[in-house]
Amino acid sequence: MNSTSITACGVRVNWQAPSDDGGKPILHYTIYGTGGGTVAKKLAVVQGAATNTFFVTGLSRTTAYTFQVTSTNEIGESGKSDASISITSQNFRKYIFVSDYVNDRILRFDFATKTFVDVFVQKGSGGLRGPWGIAFNKYDDSSQPRTFYVASEGTKSVLQYDACDGTFVKTFARVPGQPRGMKFHLLPSAHTPPRQQKMLLVCSAYTDSVLKFNALTGSPLGTYATGVDTPWDLVIGPQTYGVARDPEDIFVSSEHEDAVIQFQNTTGAFKAKFTDKKVNYANGLVFGTHEQTSHLYVTGPYAGKVIVKFDQNNGTYIEHFEDREMQYALGMVYNDRTLYVNDKNTIRTYDAETGEFLEVWSSHDGMHGSYLLFHDM
């Protein structure tokens, strides 16, 4: 027995079928773990004779474990296998996840080492075709999300995956008009009186709207906002008040209006339009959080390879950053005064205050990234 794929979520263990099953087919395997003050604790029952790998969760972090497996058939449970070598579970690490649109997969990069780690969601897994927005569900487990969601253009749906190992779980929601960006958010329900409900907001590109779904079941809850010509991405605004902004107003980039549309947080009512000639085909969208970078940044891939900066309080155009080496900027995230931008087979970084190009942060041959996302696991 051996163990691989170690993260703060858990450890993947692998084993071989027994050489002698006593003439009766195996019904299931049982995994036991020793470590963190427990001895041979039953961790999981894995159904089926053909399965010989499993991702074990629920482990204490930074703790040494060994694992054993038994097989069970009509005769009974076998003795435990030899223990695996000792392996220490990880503490949280920061990763960047990238939707690789052309190759129908999700990639993972290690933030500390700036290196490609693995294909987190395999090519075409669960029918995935044309991945766009990605999100971890912060509502299913506040300490460590258990589910991961991908907007799949080809299936017109949001697909659900295991947040620890990227295996397909199910089709979570059907999205008319093709899904793009999405975010989890608390909004008033349709009850009388309304109550706060956990929702998933999804940009529906060809219905020109933002749709609402139950964050835990995927049930459709209606339309949040309409009148956005081909919405691409959405972000939740800061929790503070601005000149023309309420806490957590929602901002949506519109490809064909070359603009960002601002909506009132709780009602979805139109409030303002941010636009400039340099936001041609507005795509990626992110807020800066530091005092000197508390702006709204937008990628404009058809306008001279630029990132445009707006005043987040009133929508006034401030300036744009241009990088002639940039090929096709799409998704973007912000961390510590730095913008991380998807640009075909690279992730490029920029100083969020000055626009200075910093480095090709990482790359992966053949990647064509659309959205990216930070996550600790």
Image (cartoon, helix red, strand yellow):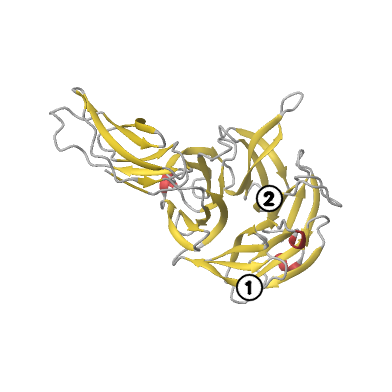
Q: Is residue 34 visible?
A: yes
Q: Secondary structure at mark 2?
A: strand
Examine the image and state in which quarter residue 185 appears.
top right
Residue kind at label 1, given as amino acid type? Phe
Spot occupied by residue 276 in the image (x, y as percentages of width and height) = 77, 65
Q: Is residue 345 visible?
A: no
Spot occupied by residue 257 in the image (x, y as percentages of width and height) = 72, 58
Residue kind at label 2, given as amino acid type? Val
Examine the image and state in which quarter residue 342 appears.
bottom right
Spot occupied by residue 246 in the image (x, y as percentages of width and height) = 81, 45
Nearer to me, 375 or 280: 375
Q: Which residue is mark 1?
A: 357
Position of residue 302 relative to residue 265, above or below, is: below
Q: Residues within 10 Å of mark 1 (few under 14, many from 20)?
A: some
Q: Residue at x 69, y 61 (%)?
A: 298
In primary-sequence order, the first of circles 2 and 1 is 2
Q: Which residue is mark 2?
A: 235
